[in-house]
Amino acid sequence: MKTISTEVLLEHCIKKKKSLTPSRILVIKTLSKSQNPKSAYDLLKEINDTEKTNLNISTIYRVLEFWINLGLIHKISAINKFLVCLTPHEKHTHMLNFCTICERVVETCSEKMGLNLQQSTKKINLSFDSNQSVEIPVICSKCS
Ligand SMILES: [Zn+2]
Ligand SMILES: [Zn+2]
């Protein structure tokens, strides 16, 4: 898995008129090295151990929140872990199929899964919030 480049991060920040700080770079680069979602505490330990920094957990959470708002990091609420979005330019709903055994995530979009969430939610008089990603618990091919 390749790590996300600083140029790409900078491009996203400029577009949203945000600045790219060293801790923002560290958090997303460290997370992008991982194939599986990581908890904020995993990230904290990994960054402070390898980078000889002294970040605290609230900084990690703040930075994660920052990237989630920019759409570059997803939170898997069911397991309270985070991972880098593989398709930040995807216009359809981001679908996070996470294996409930090994926690591997297969990210795809609603269109590729043949789902029309707007239509489905309309049936019960609700409107789908298209800014959110959707989690689906699955058992991956390695674990089944
Ligand atoms: Zn995504
Ligand atoms: Zn699995």
Image: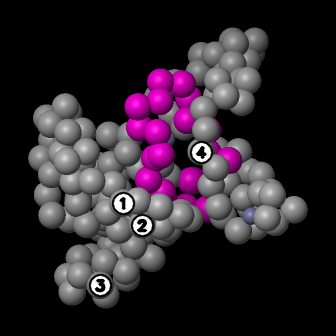
N-terminal-most mark, 3 or 1: 1
How many other residues sit within 10 Å of disc 4, few (<14), some (14-19) or many (≥20)? Answer: some
User: Label 1, on which residue?
Assistant: 3
Q: Can residue 139 be seen in this view?
A: yes
Where is residue 113 shown, x and y percent of the image? Answer: 71, 30
Q: Can residue 54 be seen in this view?
A: no
> Identity of the amino acid at label 3?
Thr
User: Label 2, on which residue?
Assistant: 33
N-terminal-most mark, 4 or 2: 2
Q: What element carries label 1?
A: loop
Disc 3 residue lies near ligand 1 with CB under 8 A: no
Where is residue 116 shown, x and y percent of the image? Answer: 69, 19
Q: Which range of residues does the magenta coloring cover?
A: 76-97
> Identity of the amino acid at label 2?
Lys
User: Label 4, on which residue?
Assistant: 107
Answer yes or no: do the residues labelled 3 and 4 have beta carbons within 8 Å? no
Q: In this view, does 143 lie above or below 75?
A: below
> Identity of the amino acid at label 4?
Glu
Residue 50's disc is 3
N-terminal-most mark, 3 or 4: 3
Q: Which of marks 3 and 1 is in front?
A: 1
